[in-house]
Amino acid sequence: MFNIIIPFPVAMKPYSIAIQANNASSLSAWYCENLGFETFDKEEFDDYSMKIYYLRQNDFVLEIIERKDAPALEKKLSKFGKSQIPGFSKIAFEVTGLDDYIEKLKERNTNFLMEKSRSKQKNIQFSMFYDLEGNLIQLIERVP
């Protein structure tokens, strides 16, 4: 077996990620109020029974998508959480001032998986919690 490396002319960097939501309006508001995103656009696609809220923080775009015909995942995952099925399991953001984020989220009754932990091998401390619809979020801060 050979590893073939194909040179790409341009470096790649993350641009956006999309989250399927039961209620795009509420989930968008949660990300704005709790993680400092701002909504910069909204589109509705009536032919697909879909609406998309576009949120931004610096150069990163978060799309919150609501489809009226999407199946309810909670009914199929009564035994497991969303982060335990194949596919993306969390979104991680690098921050400064992790303790300030944690305090703000605690004041808003956020459901934490891990309030604060540290990885000495990676020189980071982090917090893991769930958003309004049960998606796993991780905040990471580099430490010396």
Image (cartoon, rainbow, N blue to C red):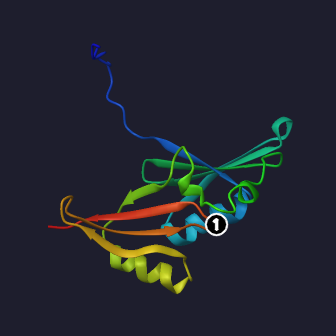
Estimate the x, y position of residue 99 in percent, counting from the top left: 34, 79
- Residue at x 53%, y 71% (from the top left corner): 34
- Which residue is the extreme one toward the front? 79
Q: What is the secondary structure assignment of the residue under circle 1?
A: helix
- Front position in the image: 111 or 11: 111
Q: Identify the residue at horizontal 51%, vertical 86% (top origin).
A: 107
Q: Nearer the viewer, residue 77 or 103?
A: 77
- The reply, left or right, for residue 76 in relation to residue 139 is right
Is residue 22 visible in the rendered structure shown here?
Answer: yes
Disc 1 marks a residue whose amino acid type is Ala
User: In the rendered view, does 7 fall on the left or right side of 135?
Assistant: left
Q: Is residue 97 visible?
A: no
Q: Up-down: is 7 above or below 119?
A: above
Residue tagged 1: 29
| Residue positioned 56% across, 66% down in the render | 32
The local crowd at label 1, few if under 14, some if 14 to 19, many if 20 or more residues have their Cα within 10 Å, is some
Viewport quadrant of the C terminus: bottom left
Please tell me whether residue 47 is drawn above or below residue 68 in the rendered image.
above
Residue 2, position as x, y percentages in the image:
27, 13
In percent of the image, x 41 and y 56: which residue is there? Answer: 92
Farthest left residue in view: 144
Quadrant position of the N terminus in the picture: top left
Viewed as shown, does residue 70 lie left or right of 21? right
Report x, y in % for residue 42: 69, 49
Residue 7 falls in image quadrant:
top left
The quadrant in which residue 94 appears is bottom left
- Percent position of residue 13, x then y: 37, 37
Q: Nearer the viewer, residue 105 or 76?
A: 76
